[in-house]
């Protein structure tokens, strides 16, 4: 048996923590340091560590835990009030990047010559990749700043969940063209079915856990273990049975338990697990996926253009949606910034497209670089966007 994974974990934990402290000293969120650690350790720089099945699985647990904690911390009353606003923000946050990515791909003629008959579909797929939003990085940053339950923070969380659903629909439409076995109507029914399942199963579990707490009101680990099992079951069912992202299932599980009388205890225990292992591995693993050696000058230029479009279209699309729904210019800008990060969601979409032949292998590096850079800069831009000028001036 190979025990190298133990050493890899130790290196990741030490490097993410050390660089996290460095970025904190520079008045940036510690998550930026963890992301940079992955870039330094991976093929892009020192080439000491590589992405592996084990690290990917631990990373997946990490993002599930982060999203569950985001659900626990979400102000559901504010989420209800911002429901329509979140939908409009998410809709424009999908349509504008989709159009931007498609136009960039068309302008750069990035489709492979041997797949020229599928060029239009490939270019559309580039746009679909840019529609993705990974809220996990934003959530961690907002947690550090204590801004999760703000009006802008709640809108970001709600819009990101809806964004995932709209992204799934868009992905299904394009993949159904490449894979005749995909049934669009069936997929839409599965999405509706997931939320129906979540309501029934969630209410049932909440009732059971509250009854259990009433019988044994003292904080104990059994409550936490049961809630973790519930989170994992919801994540599994979302992905396996309904085709909805597992992180959406985890977030819904957190929302269900956000009204539990043991919410603070559950959150505190999960925060320990997240900080100790799974979150550092998740953040570092994003950087480990970057490989720059195979990029030509033309691909590098395409990467820079794609990156610029990825940033600008999310700010414009989501910011415009927020402004239409009555948010202040500052809140609209904060929401647009919070939706920039593409993270693991875009990588999952890219992997799906590569498997179906919708994108060429050479395009994977520009996509990953775009994903990583948007993920790294989002916490930095978020902190600047939420900065209180009055408090700074007073200090």
Image (cartoon, grey):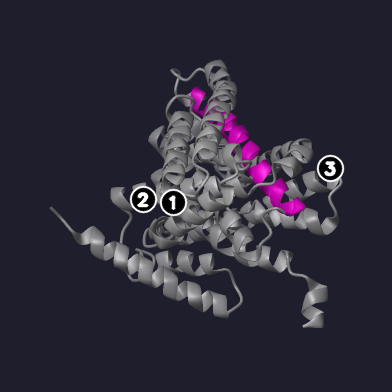
Tag 3 residue = 325
- Crowding near the residue tagged with mark 2, few <14, some 14–19, many ≥20 C-alpha atoms within 10 Å: some
Q: Is residue 164 rendered to the left or right of residue 13?
A: right
Circle 1 residue: 62
Q: Residue at x 61, y 47 (%)?
A: 107
Crowd band around label 3 with a 10 angstrom C-alpha radius: few (<14), some (14–19), many (20+) = some
The mark tally for this picture is 3
The answer, for residue 3, to whether it is visible in the render is yes
Q: Nearer the viewer, residue 287 or 280?
A: 280
In the rendered structure, the answer to whether residue 296 lies left or right of residue 7 reads right
- Marks 2/1: CA distance? 6 Å
| Label 3 or label 1, whichever comes before in sequence order | 1
The answer for how far apart the CA atoms under marks 2 and 3 are is 38 Å
Q: Choose the circle earlier in sequence order: 2 or 3.
A: 2
- Residue at the bottom extreme? 395
The quadrant of the rendering that contains the C terminus is bottom right
Q: Position of residue 225 (x, y in %)?
A: 41, 43
Q: In the rendered image, which residue does mark 2 sit on?
A: 58
In the rendered image, residue 163 lying in the magenta stretch gets the answer: yes
Compared to residue 356, the image places residue 126 above or below, namely below
SS for callout 1? helix
C-beta proximity under 8 Å, tags 2 and 1: yes
Visible residue check, residue 133: no
Region of the chain picked out in magenta, as a range: 150-176
């Amino acid at each position: 048996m190979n025990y190298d994974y133990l050493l890899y974990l130790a290196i990741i934990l030490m490097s993410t923590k050390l660089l996290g402290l460095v970025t904190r000293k520079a008045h940036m969120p510690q998550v930026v340091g963890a992301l940079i650690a992955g870039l330094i350790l991976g093929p892009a720089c020192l080439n000491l560590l590589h992405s592996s099945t084990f690290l990917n699985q631990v990373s997946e647990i990490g993002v599930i835990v982060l999203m569950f904690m985001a659900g626990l911390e979400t102000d559901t009353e504010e989420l209800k009030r911002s429901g329509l606003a979140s939908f409009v923000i998410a809709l424009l946050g999908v349509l504008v990047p989709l159009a931007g990515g498609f136009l960039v791909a068309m302008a750069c003629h990035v489709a492979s010559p041997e797949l020229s008959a599928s060029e239009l579909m490939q270019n559309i797929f580039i746009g679909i990749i840019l529609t993705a939003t990974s809220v996990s990085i934003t959530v961690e940053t907002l947690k550090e700043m204590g801004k999760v339950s703000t009006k802008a923070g709640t809108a970001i969380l709600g819009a990101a969940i809806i964004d995932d659903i709209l992204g799934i629909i868009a992905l299904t439409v394009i993949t159904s063209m490449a894979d005749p076995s995909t049934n669009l109507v069936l997929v839409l029914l599965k999405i509706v079915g997931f939320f129906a399942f979540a309501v029934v199963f969630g209410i049932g579990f909440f009732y059971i856990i509250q009854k259990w707490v009433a019988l044994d009101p003292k904080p104990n680990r059994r409550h936490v273990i049961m809630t973790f099992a519930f989170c994992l079951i919801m994540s599994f069912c979302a992905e396996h049975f309904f085709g909805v992202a597992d992180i959406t299932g985890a977030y819904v599980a957190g929302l269900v338990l956000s009204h539990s009388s043991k919410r603070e205890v559950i959150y505190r225990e999960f925060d320990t697990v997240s900080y100790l292992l799974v979150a550092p591995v998740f953040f570092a693993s994003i950087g480990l996926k970057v490989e720059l050696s195979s990029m030509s000058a033309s691909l590098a230029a395409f990467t820079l253009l794609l990156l610029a479009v990825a940033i600008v279209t999310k700010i414009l699309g989501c910011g415009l949606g927020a402004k239409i729904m009555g948010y202040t210019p500052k809140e609209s800008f904060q929401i647009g910034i919070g939706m920039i990060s593409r993270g693991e969601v875009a990588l999952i979409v890219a992997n799906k497209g590569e498997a179906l032949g919708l994108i060429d292998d050479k395009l994977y590096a520009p996509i990953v670089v775009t994903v990583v850079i948007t993920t790294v800069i989002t916490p930095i831009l978020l902190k600047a966007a939420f900065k209180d000028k009055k408090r700074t001036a007073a200090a």
